[in-house]
Image: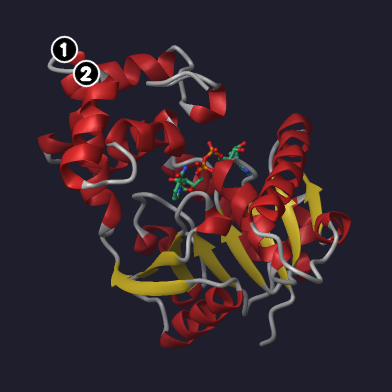
Amino acid sequence: MSIQTVGVIGAGVMGVGVAHNLAQTGYSVILVDIADDILAHAKEEITKNIRLQRMLNRKQNQESVETLLNRITLTQEYGLLTDVDFVIENATEKWEIKKKIYELIDPICPQDVIFAVNTSAISITRVGSVTKRAQQIIGTHFMNPVPMKKTVEVIRGYHTSEETITTTLELLANMGKEGIVVNDMPGIVSNRVLMLTVNEAVYLVQDQVATAEEVDRIFKSCFGHPMGPLETADLIGLDTILYSVDVLYESYNDSKYRPCPLLKKMVDAGLYGRKSGQGFYTY
Ligand SMILES: NC(=O)c1ccc[n+]([C@@H]2O[C@H](COP(=O)([O-])OP(=O)(O)OC[C@H]3O[C@@H](n4cnc5c(N)ncnc54)[C@H](O)[C@@H]3O)[C@@H](O)[C@H]2O)c1
């Protein structure tokens, strides 16, 4: 099937990046979220990011910002997903939220449409279990910021078919990305390691072993990481980190995934990192 229109669910940090990337590679996008103010903010972010990317990367014969924006329909109306050819879901990292979305879209979207789950830690097989199309459920763990990052962790659920994997890798290639296909386990490869590292780094700050800045400097100066774990946490969103650690804790029933109390406290205080203007650093 030729993919022309992609439904993108969730217009937060990741949904904005996925919609922007799809539009700039020629796809029409239906971007769905739950409130007008969120959609208005998403449109502002996409416009700003397209302009910023152009300043950094001056190429001849670029399509106009308006052309790209015209490819994206922002809506609260799930009914518009009746005509999409592929779905990439980027809603909040909470099982109850994602579960309801898949129960809602399964009867709405055409039967042959693939649902790609952009998740940090939730099991793809579990998502498949709430739909009647488990063979067409796949994980696409995009990296942030999406238009700049070339690699996607692609997750094969228990029932995911080879055809689904092939179609998804083709779509990613058209978006300028390479997929690395791995098997489904909560947190997959990257976040089983990264979320533990970030959580432990928060413990270091909580226990006053070092400041956030000192922790990050050690990772950057000693190991050559481009960003430290707490800068990374602010970029991802501390709420998303906490929900992901919660999912890992619930999935493995292993105390090594217990979320740090300071992380919980910061999320309760609304300190989400870059997206709220304050996390371990001020933006
Ligand atoms: N932030 C990252 O760096 C990152 C990286 C890779 C994957 N992810 C994963 O991507 C997903 C989205 O993360 P994010 O950082 O964009 O989160 P976010 O909190 O920035 O955005 C989530 C969006 O989902 C929307 N939403 C909630 N319920 C909805 C519903 N019923 N229908 C439509 N939209 C709904 C929210 O309003 C919000 O705009 C999560 O599963 C996360 O784990 C995040």
Residue at screen point 53% across, 57% down = 148
For disc 2, the marked residue is 205
Tag 1–tag 2 contact (CB < 8 Å): yes
Q: In this view, does 80 lie to the left or right of 259?
A: right
Q: Which amino acid does label 2 sit on?
A: Val
Residue marked by disc 1: 208
Q: Which residue type does callout 1 highlight? A: Gln
Q: Is mark 1 on a helix, strand or loop?
A: loop
282 is higher (above) or lower (below) than 222: above
Density class for disc 2 (Cα within 10 Å; few <14, some 14-19, many ≥20) is some
Horizontal and vertical percent position of residue 138 = 45, 69
Return the x and y of residue 247 as percentages of the image width and height.
31, 41
Residue 115 in the image: state x and y as whole percent: 55, 67
Quadrant housing residue 229: top left
**Quadrant of the frame with the N terminus:** bottom right
Please indicate, yes or no, whether residue 259 appears anywhere in the rendered image: no
Is the CB of mark 2 within 8 Å of ligand 1? no
135 vs 242, left or right, is right
Estimate how packed mark 1 is, as few (under 14), some (14 to 19) or many (20 or more) residues with alpha carbons within 10 Å: few
Residue positioned 53% across, 22% down in the render: 283
Identify which residue, 72 or 58, lies in the foreground. 58
The image's mark for residue 61 is none
Up-down relation of residue 213 to residue 217 (above or below): above
Image coords of residue 225 (percent x, y): 27, 46
Q: Nearer the viewer, residue 248 or 97?
A: 248
With 186 as the anchor, is 266 left or right in this view? Answer: right
